[in-house]
Image: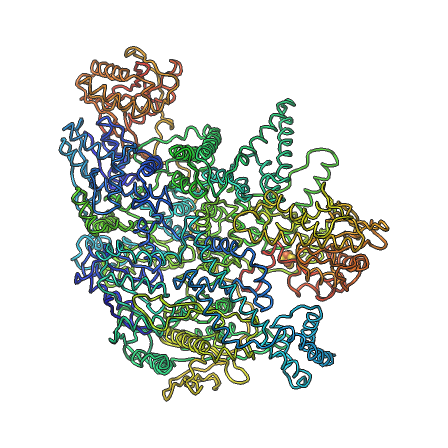
């Protein structure tokens, strides 16, 4: 005898309460529609596994391809979303099939006609659940008897099951099986309790509303956030009887689990699906890189993806290259690839490989980079040929499989049995990362997705080309809901789990509805069929539900949660989702209506009140968290032992002069930011690119001859170079939408080139070096840096430095006027070898084509800035540096964002501090500082201890 | 359209009436729940309406109807339009999975479109904008584009708007009679004279004098260099020198500059900018539409246009005519023109429409609604009938109702709103307990520059002080609390009863900060989420999770979480010492030529930092929002935040940040880009200062006893016992020079959008607004008069909203100026003669005075405030309770894994019996599929009827894709052999194939066994357990597997079966169909 308890859906362990502790049953199981089909299929000898959704959609797309003559009801929509339309029509077809449609021709509307014509097409369609159910029912009818004794008991009213499921049940009954309907829900709790009263009021809408006393058998647990609600709920669950509890986890199961684990309770271990796991993003990124222009940002994303396709050192090197020149296959990228090859070979040699093997290792890695980032590129406007896309998918799938394999071995032994249970079946210590032994699953899943995607592509006509949008739409179908993952194992001792309200079974002592919030446990609005369509469907034997029928079942299922409990029911809700207010679940309306005179308020426990020791019918277990000490921005730190050591750059010194604290953290404290996705863009991108173009114009292999070239030549030449190099070295500028920026940049560089030539000529200068490494010392400290442009005067061989700046004419002018042109002064000092008169120096502001200098005699035609000489600037800076050094020696480090609060203390030790308008008072560079947390964050208004 | 209108003044029970009306229609069967379309202004209002209707139906026992409410179209107009667009996606040629793209993506696509359009035009636009001191020409451009979309205007309409705008601008400017070259040449001499005067004026003079001189010099330099100075610079200087001591020198200059209005260059600049901006706007509209088409997306704004378009199609109309019974529109006064078009189109299909609203509360003109258009539409609906008026205030106490009625009856008379639509009657007399409590209060504070050492005074601090005093009043201020409909009780006021209204968001934030400084919790919908301490901490935590070597993130986590709070210097010194020591070791290693030590991880001595680093190992498989949650958990943020001041706010913000993580994911999905934890860190970092006003918002905790601080606009629809109106010196903020939608002269119900166009006149003087002849000219033009009147009307309506929010006490705060209280915001409440309709006793002596409106007067408390920040709070905060953690639980998984978990059994191979000849397998088939096919066959093998058995075998092999690997006869033979073997040994036994087993296992913790026995042979005395294994390999490997892998599973199953059947195990066997043998396994108890 086989006894089946049929629930409206598959999954969960709510059936657990049907068994007494210690009880075992043979020949008994709880199944949903899939489980039923599978079981009957086994008995009859029919494999009853539905095909995967993407496979079915792909097959349906093929039908649409043949059927679409451009005049179908769906034709226009197909232009917008070919795969979405297929998925939509297939969904409609499956729903009609579940409602009893046999595939007969349909009239009533164009779309119905489309659906029925598509059904008749010869292209194969892998079976879905409706197909399996229909086939099994037909087989039963044909066989006339079931091969074994079967009794099916429904756990819910017949309306909760699709007509086709009911048809299978009818066929089973006709073939000799016993099919028993569900016992109507009846109150299980004693009438003297809140729960008993509420159950009675719910069962009979005509009965008087229940007056609830707040005895704890009905609870509405609330908090502002899911995080806090989870803590409240866990604390409530700590009261015991977990194994006699059913949990309906309607939303955010992982948040509840986190709280359960924190409070030392068994994790429920439900999994959550996501399409955005790193593993699932490898393929779309690789596909995005198959289009031209290649977006450097996509390349960077692929490089930072956890577990991505290259070794860490190679990824870091390539990311650096993108940071230097944001373009895949830029010169910096090529250099990086070469260096990576060498590094791989070196590592191989270090692990005792032969020279040949080491070289091969390097070559292999270079090839791998080529495979991931190279290959023939397709024009995004034209599309990627389907065979090429499929080949990419195949390669990525192969890599994903190989990525899964080693982890798979590690994870072996954690195999899961296949049976009617919920998804999470791991065990062990929840504080140990569940992920450790489990890396294989997501990779393997991603590989399967890539394979599915490949198959979907191969079902397309081979001559077809897919544009990025269409490719991603198709990929989204292959990914479906994404990959499942449970952050914790489903631990022994956890409550029984119902995945949907309709599957809660009577008999648990307590039922908890976690996630009693709007929009969960609420079905979509029914298909909107017109009257003629309804008539046509009825004529074709399709049982469309009456208006509101689905809602009636839904409302029944909500009531079931209350009626299933013997001792208590609790609804847990939170009031915020993001920054928005989240409404409670609509069932609250019924609860409020069936509880007399607002008496549900007596059952409501807010976390705020519970924590304050009010309102909870159980004693919450709390700890007192001591108030955090106030945090205030500090203007003066007492940190002994800081000294200016090592070689300094102009940037470092500027930071130090502006804010010793900034310097101390960044350089003495070696505090660096982590990896980031911020490739240069905007002015930084253009500035870097313009630097290279102008430097190459003057000093590159095909340099301009200053003797013969005109300003117009310079302009034309640099604009040509801009056009030739922009796609690889500043690729963001060739992406769609950057046209304007590119146009601006090109104009700017052209104008700057003309200006540069003009200024050089005017001063009789010729360029001699770009990015020249300079070294020197400042106030006894070693100094180093790279000068943008070193020029030499023809007539006397004197040298000068020109520093290129994209913009900021006013800023630089003020800087020079006030004697704070530190960078120019330091470069001049290094170029001049220190001591004596400094060589001339100037800023060239590319945007305006203006040259700013305090040595106008050296740069006729430049803007003469009236300000201290470079020597004076150095001396001013030296004075400030000496002050801060003294402060360091005394163990004081001021943070200078605020103008007061530190000066007097520091002045007492180091002597007078330059006033805010003094040249020696360099303003702090707070807007570029990474340490604003220490200078801005304030916590607590109370007095500091 | 068959429509009714309900006019519902403030506090008259509008939602109640709506729900009641709908209930009655449903109850009477005149309307089906699925046939209801109800538009509300907010999502919250939609939920509330739905909930009220459902409750009414449930209360009346109409359970079935109540359940169906959900299927109606109740929601914001966008949501309903989206549903319609989805339902009719095929008709509209849209994707059936239509989802509007997130706002940042919309902006990105718009920018893409605009970038293309601006190519070749930008340089000229920039030149014009510079000449006309237009800081950012993108701003008017955006406004024109937005207005076009709100009004359903296309590119051609914008081009027509350009023509009409030009015509207006030409009228404004008058004839151009002066050539620019002549004008500029004529400017030099008066400027030179002025310069001389300014130079002597500036000598040793004040900073303003020096500024004037600098301005004149710049002007002179520009003229000398042959550049055209900006019009603003000229006018600004002319205005700046308008003073008696400079009169003689300035007069010629000022007179000449005044002539710029006739200058052709000035006219040309304005007209060209106007033309180019309209051209760009029109092209942008087209390009944006194309951009979205290419990306196959729609935006939020498209929903309305799509729905409007759909509703014009006969097929859709026919379908909806069947379905729709009632169209209900809430807050009808606030809908935009395009929304109106949708509403009327739907109304034409439904049997009936009911519009509910209050013209007096139409305050969203700045967001594109058009109260004038709505008035016309309402008149058209009413067709001369009077609206139904809800005339009872259920909200406010008597004095407040009377005062608002009296005040606004006069103020609205000018707007053509009859007295009966303004005056309300209070529901009932005040309770006696309120008799001695004044219904009004006002406070003044004095601004001005602080003297040395004094703190700066501000209105925010004044308000905070007022609230502090109110809440500390003895005896306490009483407020009414509604116990149930019609029944109130009095209780002392607490913070949650108070709301402060200000006009600007920034002011709201200031007030909230000032309140908090006094230890008064404040609830404010404010931005700046990512810069809150919790925002920064959470971002740093996830950054550290994404990259454990991120030193800056480690620093932030450690500092903000308070590790260094008790000894900041020591905290930082320790870190610096660690780095210094590492550097020294590194130097030694370099010197010695040995490998350099690894760079130490920053703040590794901080447990929280290390916990995050440890967690980063687990983040590799997570989506960004999961990684974010993991960072919160690993960093113990919820617990930590409990220790902070205002923990409820901080925790609510944590949820807001989680919301941002979801937004980031949605954005990535819409952009079809990768979503990574690092990307999330970037996203969170980019929130501050972004363009999206919906981003970076802090959450508002709901359960705190906190003062609400809100803008006047956002207060609409809400009420509080005590309301303080502030920011009363806020003036007008719109002018005739803003892009404005102009309505058609007459409203056509059939085509509500017809004849609308956009007027835009560029403003040439940047931020200057005073003493400008052009503005004066514009003000007297019909357009200017109309704009001014419109603005004034809307401000009156906003004042009405503010004045009607309070239930029990209405307060005002104003700065006391030298010439009286600074209450510019109340100017629209003056009568035709300029006399204020309301007199608030700001200047009276502290104590009791009266608020007066006309001849009526009501008591008002008067107070004076210092308006300075409080000193630091004294005394430590108290510990905050939080849920206690528990010890880690180490237990096995709930569901036993029979083949993977050891069972205390000593397994032996008792014997292996051959069952026939071994079958041949084709090379390397998928063994799992082979196994499934074999199991499938053996489970269903009927044992007789060779034809159907062969058919079954074939079906199984085909179904599992292994037909090439195995012949059907192999399966038949295996089935025969097994049957023969079993029947020989246990004749008459009952066969259970693929038999489900379920067991709740004893012991602690309780576990479950979920499995399926391949074959159980049940006899009267016991049972035999047989497991099929398709393993085809060697005998040695078979024996190993039998003992190590198969035996535990057999043992688990045997244990469950013994329980279930109450009989003993007679034997446990493993059947190898491909090896054609059966092995008996001994399952002895383990020693
Ligand atoms: S934020 Fe400003 S004051 Fe603070 S460390 Fe950085 S530069 Fe210095």
Q: Position of residue A816 (x, y in %)?
A: 74, 61
Label total for image: 0
- Which quarter of the frame holds ligand 1? bottom right
Whether residue A266 is visible here, answered yes or no, is no
Colouring chosen for the image of the structure: rainbow
Which corner quadrant of the image does residue B499 belong to?
Answer: bottom left
Q: Is residue A356 above or below residue B331?
A: above
Q: Quadrant of the N terminus of chain B?
A: bottom left
Left or right: A670 with respect to B835? right
Q: Is residue B627 above or below residue B328?
A: above
Q: Position of residue A43 (x, y in %)?
A: 22, 27
Whether residue A118 is visible here, answered yes or no, is yes
Q: Is residue B729 above or below residue A673?
A: below
* A137 vs B1078, nearest the viewer: A137
Q: Position of residue B106 (x, y in %)?
A: 45, 54
Which corner quadrant of the image does residue A724 belong to?
Answer: top right
Residue at the image position 33 percent from the left and 14 percent from the top: B1075
Q: Position of residue B124 (x, y in %)?
A: 58, 61
Which corner quadrant of the image does residue A130 belong to?
Answer: top left
Left or right: B934 with respect to A844? left
Q: Is residue B929 above or below residue A696?
A: above
Q: Residue furthest bottom?
A: B855
Left or right: B745 with respect to B759? left
Q: Quadrant of the C terminus of chain B?
A: top left
């Amino acid at each position: 005898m086989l006894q089946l308890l049929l629930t409206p859906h598959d999954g969960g362990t709510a059936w657990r309460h049907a068994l007494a502790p210690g009880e075992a049953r043979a020949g008994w199981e709880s199944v949903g529609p899939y489980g039923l089909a599978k079981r009957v299929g086994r008995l009859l000898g029919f494999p009853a596994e539905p095909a995967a959704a993407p496979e079915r959609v792909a097959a349906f797309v093929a039908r649409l391809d043949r059927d679409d003559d451009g005049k179908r009801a769906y034709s226009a929509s197909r232009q917008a979303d070919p795969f979405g339309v297929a998925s939509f029509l297939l969904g409609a077809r499956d729903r009609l099939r579940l409602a009893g449609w046999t595939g007969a021709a349909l009239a009533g509307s164009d779309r119905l006609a489309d659906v029925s014509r598509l059904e008749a097409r010869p292209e194969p369609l892998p079976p879905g659940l409706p197909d399996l159910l229909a086939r099994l029912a037909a087989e039963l009818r044909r066989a006339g008897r079931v091969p074994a004794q079967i009794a099916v008991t429904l756990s819910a009213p017949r309306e909760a099951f699709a007509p086709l499921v009911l048809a299978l049940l009818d066929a089973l009954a006709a073939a000799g099986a016993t099919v028993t309907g569900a016992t109507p829900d009846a109150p299980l709790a004693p009438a003297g309790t809140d729960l008993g009263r509420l159950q009675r009021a719910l069962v009979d809408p005509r009965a008087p509303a229940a007056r609830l006393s707040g005895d704890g058998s009905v609870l509405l647990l609330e908090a502002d956030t899911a995080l806090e609600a989870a803590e409240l709920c866990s604390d409530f669950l700590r009261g015991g009887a977990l194994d006699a509890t059913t949990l309906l986890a309607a939303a955010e199961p992982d948040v509840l689990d986190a709280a359960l684990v924190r409070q030392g309770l068994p994790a429920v271990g439900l999994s959550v699906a996501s399409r955005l796991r790193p593993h699932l993003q490898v393929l779309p990124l690789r596909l995005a890189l198959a289009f031209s222009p290649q977006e450097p940002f996509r390349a960077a994303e692929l490089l930072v993806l956890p577990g991505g396709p290259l070794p860490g050192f190679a990824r870091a090197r390539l990311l650096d290259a993108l940071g230097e020149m944001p373009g895949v296959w830029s010169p910096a990228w090529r250099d990086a690839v070469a260096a990576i090859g060498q590094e791989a070979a070196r590592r191989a040699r270090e692990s005792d490989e032969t020279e040949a093997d080491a070289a091969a290792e390097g070559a292999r890695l270079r090839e791998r980079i080529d495979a991931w980032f190279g290959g023939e590129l397709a024009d995004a406007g034209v599309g990627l040929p389907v065979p090429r896309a499929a080949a990419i998918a195949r390669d990525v799938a192969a890599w994903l499989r190989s990525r899964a394999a080693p982890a798979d071995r590690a994870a072996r032994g954690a195999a899961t049995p296949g049976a009617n249970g919920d998804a999470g079946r791991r065990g062990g210590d929840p504080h140990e990362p569940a992920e450790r032994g489990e890396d294989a699953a997501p990779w393997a899943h991603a590989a399967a997705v890539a394979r599915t995607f490949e198959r979907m592509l191969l079902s397309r006509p081979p001559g077809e080309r897919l544009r990025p949008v269409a490719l991603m739409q198709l990929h989204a179908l292959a990914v479906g809901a994404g990959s499942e993952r449970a952050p914790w194992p489903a631990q022994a001792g956890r409550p029984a789990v119902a995945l949907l309200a309709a599957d809660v079974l009577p008999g648990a002592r307590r039922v908890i509805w976690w996630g009693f919030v709007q929009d969960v446990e609420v079905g979509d609005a029914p298909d909107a069929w017109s009257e003629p369509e309804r008539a046509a469907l009825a004529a074709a034997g399709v049982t469309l539900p009456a208006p509101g029928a689905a809602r009636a079942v839904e409302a029944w299922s909500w009531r079931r949660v209350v009626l299933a409990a013997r001792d208590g029911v609790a609804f847990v809700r939170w009031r915020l989702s993001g920054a928005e207010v989240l409404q409670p679940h609509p069932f609250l309306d019924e609860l409020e209506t069936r509880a007399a005179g607002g008496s549900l308020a007596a059952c409501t426990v807010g976390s705020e009140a519970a924590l304050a020791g009010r309102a909870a019918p159980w004693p919450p277990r709390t700890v007192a968290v001591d108030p955090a000490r106030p945090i205030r921005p500090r203007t003066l730190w007492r940190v002994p032992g800081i000294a200016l050591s090592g070689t300094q750059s102009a940037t470092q010194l500027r930071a130090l002069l502006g804010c010793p604290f900034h310097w101390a953290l960044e350089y003495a404290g070696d505090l660096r930011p982590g990896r980031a996705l911020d490739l240069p863009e905007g002015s930084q991108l253009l500035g870097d690119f313009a630097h290279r173009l102008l430097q190459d114009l003057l000093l590159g292999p095909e340099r301009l001859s200053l003797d013969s070239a005109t300003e117009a030549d310079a302009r034309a030449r640099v604009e040509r170079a801009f056009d030739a190099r922009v796609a690889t070295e500043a690729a963001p500028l060739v992406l769609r939408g950057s046209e304007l920026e590119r146009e601006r940049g090109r104009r700017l560089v052209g104008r700057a080139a003309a200006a540069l030539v003009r200024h050089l000529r005017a001063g009789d200068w010729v360029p001699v070096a770009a990015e020249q490494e300079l070294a020197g010392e400042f106030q006894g400290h070693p100094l180093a840096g790279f000068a943008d442009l070193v020029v030499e005067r023809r007539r006397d061989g004197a040298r000068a430095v020109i520093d290129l700046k994209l913009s900021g004419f006013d800023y630089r002018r003020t800087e020079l006027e006030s004697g704070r042109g530190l960078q120019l002064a330091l470069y001049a000092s290094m170029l001049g070898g220190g001591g004596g008169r400094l060589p001339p120096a100037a800023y060239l502001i590319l945007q305006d084509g203006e040259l700013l200098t305090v040595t106008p005699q050296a740069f006729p035609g430049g803007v003469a800035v009236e300000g201290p000489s470079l020597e004076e600037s150095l001396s001013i800076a030296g004075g400030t540096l000496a002050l801060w050094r003294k402060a360091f020696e005394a163990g004081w480090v001021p943070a200078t964002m605020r103008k007061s609060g530190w000066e007097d203390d520091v002045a007492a030790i180091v002597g007078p501090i330059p006033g805010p308008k003094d040249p020696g008072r360099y303003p702090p560079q707070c807007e570029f500082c990474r340490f604003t947390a220490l200078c801005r964050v304030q916590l607590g208004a109370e007095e500091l201890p | 359209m068959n429509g009714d209108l309900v006019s519902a003044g403030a506090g008259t029970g509008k939602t109640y009436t709506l729900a009641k009306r709908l209930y009655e229609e449903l109850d009477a069967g005149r309307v089906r729940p699925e046939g209801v379309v109800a538009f509300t202004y907010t999502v919250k209002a939609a939920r509330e309406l739905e909930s009220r209707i459902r409750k009414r139906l449930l209360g009346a026992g109409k359970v079935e109807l109540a359940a169906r409410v959900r299927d109606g179209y109740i929601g914001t107009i966008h949501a309903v339009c989206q549903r319609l667009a989805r339902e009719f996606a095929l008709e509209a040629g849209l994707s059936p999975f239509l989802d509007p793209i997130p706002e940042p993506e919309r902006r990105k696509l718009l920018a893409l479109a605009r970038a293309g359009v601006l190519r070749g035009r930008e340089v000229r636009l920039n030149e014009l904008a510079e000449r006309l001191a237009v800081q950012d020409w993108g701003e008017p451009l955006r406004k024109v584009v937005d207005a076009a979309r709100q009004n359903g205007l296309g590119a051609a309409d914008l081009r027509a708007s350009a023509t009409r705008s030009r015509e207006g601008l030409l009228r404004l400017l008058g004839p151009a009679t002066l050539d620019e070259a002549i004008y500029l040449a004529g400017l030099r001499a008066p400027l030179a004279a002025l310069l001389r005067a300014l130079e002597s004026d500036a000598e040793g003079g004040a900073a303003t004098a020096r500024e004037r001189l600098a301005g004149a010099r710049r002007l002179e330099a520009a003229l000398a260099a042959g550049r055209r100075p900006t019009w603003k610079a000229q006018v600004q200087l002319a205005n700046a020198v308008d003073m008696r001591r400079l009169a003689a020198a300035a007069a010629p200059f000022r007179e000449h500059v005044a002539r710029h209005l006739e200058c052709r260059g000035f006219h040309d600049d304005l007209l060209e900018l106007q033309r180019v901006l309209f051209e760009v706007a029109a092209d942008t509209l087209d390009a944006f539409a194309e951009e979205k088409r290419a990306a196959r997306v729609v935006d939020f704004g498209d929903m309305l246009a799509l729905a409007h378009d759909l509703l014009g199609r006969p097929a859709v109309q026919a379908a909806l005519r069947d379905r729709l019974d009632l169209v209900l529109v809430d807050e009808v006064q606030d809908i935009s023109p395009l929304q109106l078009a949708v509403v009327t189109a739907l109304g034409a299909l439904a049997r009936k429409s009911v519009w509910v609203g209050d013209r007096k509360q139409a305050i969203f003109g700045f967001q594109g609604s058009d109260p004038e258009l709505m008035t016309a539409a309402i008149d058209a609906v009413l067709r001369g009938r009077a609206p139904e008026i809800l005339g009872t205030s259920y909200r406010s106490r008597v004095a407040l109702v009377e005062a608002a009625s009296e005040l606004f009856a006069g103020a609205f008379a000018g707007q053509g709103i009859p007295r009966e639509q303004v005056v309300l009657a209070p529901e009932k007399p005040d309770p006696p307990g309120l008799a001695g409590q004044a219904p009004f209060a006002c406070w003044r504070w004095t601004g001005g520059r602080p003297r040395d050492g004094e703190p700066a005074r501000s209105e925010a601090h004044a308000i905070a002080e007022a609230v502090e005093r109110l809440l500390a009043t003895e005896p306490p201020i009483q407020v009414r609390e509604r116990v149930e409909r019609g029944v109130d009780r009095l209780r002392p006021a607490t913070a949650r009863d108070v709301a402060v209204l200000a006009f600007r968001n920034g002011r709201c934030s200031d007030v909230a900060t000032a309140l908090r400084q006094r230890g008064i919790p404040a609830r404010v919908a404010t931005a700046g989420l990512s810069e809150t301490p919790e925002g920064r901490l959470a971002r740093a935590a996830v950054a550290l999770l994404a990259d454990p070597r991120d030193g800056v993130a480690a620093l932030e986590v450690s500092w903000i979480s308070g590790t260094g709070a008790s000894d900041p210097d020591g905290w930082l010194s320790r870190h610096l010492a660690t780095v210094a020591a590492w550097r020294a070791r590194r130097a030694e290693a370099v010197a010695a030529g040995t490998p350099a030590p690894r760079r130490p991880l920053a703040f590794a001595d901080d447990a929280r930092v290390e916990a995050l680093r440890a967690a980063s190992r687990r983040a590799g498989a997570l989506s960004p929002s999961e990684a974010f949650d993991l960072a919160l958990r690993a960093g113990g943020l919820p617990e930590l935040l409990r220790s902070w001041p205002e923990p409820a706010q901080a925790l609510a913000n944590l949820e807001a940040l989680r919301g941002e993580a979801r937004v980031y994911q949605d954005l990535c999905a819409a952009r079809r880009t990768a979503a990574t934890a690092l990307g999330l860190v970037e996203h969170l970092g980019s929130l501050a200062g972004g363009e999206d006003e919906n981003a970076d918002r802090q959450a508002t905790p709901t359960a705190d006893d906190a003062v609400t601080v809100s803008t006047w606009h956002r207060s609409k629809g809400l009420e509080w016992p005590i309301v303080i109106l502030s920011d009363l010196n806020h003036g007008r903020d719109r002018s005739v020079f803003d892009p404005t939608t102009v309505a058609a002269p007459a409203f056509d119900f059939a085509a509500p959008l017809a004849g609308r166009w956009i007027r835009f006149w560029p403003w040439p003087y940047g931020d200057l607004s005073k003493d400008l002849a052009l503005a004066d000219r514009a003000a007297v033009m019909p357009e200017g008069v109309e704009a001014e009147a419109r603005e004034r009307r809307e401000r009156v309506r906003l004042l009405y909203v503010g004045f009607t929010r309070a239930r029990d006490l209405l307060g005002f705060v104003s700065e006391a100026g030298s010439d009286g209280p600074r209450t510019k915001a109340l100017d629209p409440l003056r009568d035709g003669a300029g006399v204020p309709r309301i007199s608030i006793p700001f200047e009276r002596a502290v104590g009791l005075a009266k608020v007066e409106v006309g001849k009526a007067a009501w008591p008002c408390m008067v107070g004076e405030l210092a308006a300075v920040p409080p000193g630091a709070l004294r005394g430590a905060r108290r510990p905050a309770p939080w849920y206690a953690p528990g010890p880690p639980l180490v237990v096995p998984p709930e569901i036993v894994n029979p083949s993977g978990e050891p069972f205390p059994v000593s397994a032996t191979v008792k014997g292996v019996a051959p069952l026939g000849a071994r079958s041949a397998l084709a090379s390397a088939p998928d063994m799992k599929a082979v196994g499934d096919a074999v199991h499938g066959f053996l489970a269903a093998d009927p044992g007789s009827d060779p034809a159907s058995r062969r058919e079954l075998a074939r079906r199984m092999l085909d179904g599992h894709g292994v037909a090439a690997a195995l012949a059907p006869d192999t399966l038949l033979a295996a089935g025969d052999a097994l049957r023969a073997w079993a029947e020989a040994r246990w004749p008459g036994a009952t066969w259970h194939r693929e038999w489900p087993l379920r067991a709740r296992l004893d012991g602690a913790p309780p576990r479950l066994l979920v499995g399926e026995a391949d074959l159980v042979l049940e006899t009267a005395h016991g049972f035999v357990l047989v497991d099929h294994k398709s393993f085809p390999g060697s005998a040695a490997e078979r024996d190993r597997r039998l003992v190590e892998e198969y035996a535990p599973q057999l043992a688990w199953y045997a244990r469950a079966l013994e329980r279930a059947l109450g009989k003993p195990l007679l034997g446990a066997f493993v059947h190898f169909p491909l090896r054609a043998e059966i092995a008996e396994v001994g399952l002895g108890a383990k020693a």
